[in-house]
Image: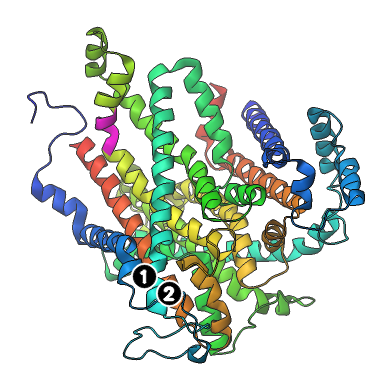
Amino acid sequence: MLRFLARRLTGSAVALLVSSFGVFGAMYLAPGDPVSFLIGNRGSTPELRAALRSQYRLDDPFLERYWRWLGSAVQGQFGESLLQRQSVSGLISARLATTAWLVALAFIVAVAVGVCVGVAAGRWPRRLLDDAVSVAVSASIATPAFVSAVLLISLFAVGTGWFPVFGSGSGSVVGRLHHLALPAVSLAIGWWALIAQTTRASIRSELGKEHVETALARGLSSGQVFRRHVLRNALIPISTSGGLTLAGLIAGTAIVETAFQLDGVGGLLISAVSGRDFPVVQAVVLLLVVAFALVNTAVDVLYTVLDPRVRLGSAA
Amino acid sequence: MTAMVLPGVRPTHKAGRASAFGLAGRLSAAVVIIFTVVALIGPWVAPHDPQAVDLKASFWGPDAGHLLGYDAAGRDLLSRLLAGARTSFLGPLVIVGFATLLGSSIAVAAAWYGRWLDSAVVAVLDVALAFPGLLLAVLTVAIVGPGLPAATLALGVAYVPHMARLVRSAALREVGRDYVDALRVQGLPAVRIAVRHVLPNIWPIVIGQAALTLAWATVDLAALSYLGLGVQPPQPDWGVMVAAGQSGVLQGYPAESVVAGVCLVVAAGAFNLLGQRLLRRCEGARAR
């Protein structure tokens, strides 16, 4: 168990280090001089060029620069934004709450709807409900978040006026929920379908196994067999798709936050890319990569808790 | 038919093939063909100039000459939709063509040479797969600047690991078969065996996965254009149209966003269904 965890953590750490090197080195892949790249189409003055050279210490060797950047990144320091006179970490921390709320709400929606629908379709296969679910799943997977966002705004914000058109709401929990309901639904639409698909498939394969037949033959009620034998075993693939979903939701915030004009981290990334504010882009991308690595590692750890075979396999 | 029946791709009966493919599979194949034709000839059959601005006609409803009405700038919506099919539908084809070519070359090379090359490829794929494709594309655009070429290249690179992983496992299975050993003993050069004999046998899986990847590429390229990082307005494109129509949505004229969004959903859905059916047929053929 410990050895398995150690191997997993080392793997994630190496992947993170490689990604951070990529994120840092990307700036130097841009055609031309890094200073001109950082300035972009802003007015170039000798003072600004000198300031950027010293801020990025462009006269030092590359690896030394990377090492220093990584050191301050670990402490949460990413320098100053080029567009707004504010520290990058300040910009990000002011927006973290909105993104965390959005991802959490969307995750709850996706898992709740996906598992319920998948269980229903898996338990009663080949009925009208099952067909309806498979049509709904295909339609949801094919619907991009920005299309569903625009449709939801048109129907439920402009059309009926039930929800605000944009803004993330602040202060009370009710205000947050009211503002983030439509964004969370639009973010969750592609992902509840994945969970429903996995749930239905894993429940069906469990239902066909011999141990279920044995349990039924011993006279256990079908409800009991379903809850204690089928659902528990089906949890393993469902938790994997849950982890995939969480990672996908984090990546999807950039689109949904732009569509609903929310002041979150994903929206900040897109506006920084459009405005060529590279320190902000570096910081947000690194933050997202760390979040992915954490989610992936957490899913693997959850695996060993849910499925003892993983532990035994690694010990052998 | 050659006398030797290759393992893995046995000829299937026509009835079995039709049932595995199903009505939905044929329907989505038809949608893909129609959309491809529209993407190729769209700009020429468009009834009006997709760029012609007429501010007096802003948000006008459908009339005889303009079946879908006008957008905010008074441009003919149907013409913009037809002209936009080119980047929205052919852009993903370029992306997937690139990813398929590069991904399957890497995969076949790794499976063929094995040992350290294979381990190195697997390690790189593991790191690359942890990085979401859209994020890689956004980072690339941040460096190269927005535009269709940058977005296409970035997404093409982003899909290589997905393609390579699937093709590698199929190629590994194939390389271990007897006929490959037989050809090797006969002294055929490695590249020739890989290209002429191994690749044709794993081709159905490659095509199925390519169709699935097309669905993602359609959505992701449109998303980049929607975010203002891909195709640049005023050039017509479905992702650009969804974004441009958003101001109309707020004023109660959702037509532009909705028609472009529906086209995207239908295209991505057709690719997705087609890919699933093709892959399922491969699995069925292997099981028989």
**Where residue A178 sits in the image (x, y, percent)?**
66, 79
Circles 1 and 2: CB atoms closer than 8 Å: yes
Quadrant in the picture for residue A70: top right
Tell me the chain of label 1.
B
In the depicted structure, whether residue B239 falls above or below residue B99 = below
**Local SS, label 2:** loop
Q: Residues within 10 Å of mark 1 (few under 14, many from 20)?
A: many
Q: Is residue A169 above or below residue A301?
A: below
Magenta segment boundaries in residue numbering: B199-203
Q: Which element carries disc 1, helix, strand or loop?
A: helix
Labelled disc at residue B82: 1
Q: Which mark is residue A260?
A: none
Q: Is residue A62 above or below residue A290?
A: above
Instruction: Inspect the image, locate mark 2, and give the three-letter code of the amino acid beneath it.
Output: Pro
Residue A255, given in percent of the width and then of the height, sits at: 59, 63
Q: Is residue A218 visible?
A: no
Q: CA distance from mark 1 to mark 2?
A: 9 Å
Does B170 sit left or right of A47 as displayed?
A: left
* Chain where mark 2 sits: B
Which residue position holds label 2? Answer: B50
Residue B201 belongs to the span the image colors magenta: yes
Task: Specify the principal SS of the magenta part.
Answer: helix
> Label 1 is placed on what type of residue?
Leu
Could you tell me if residue B60 is visible in this image? yes
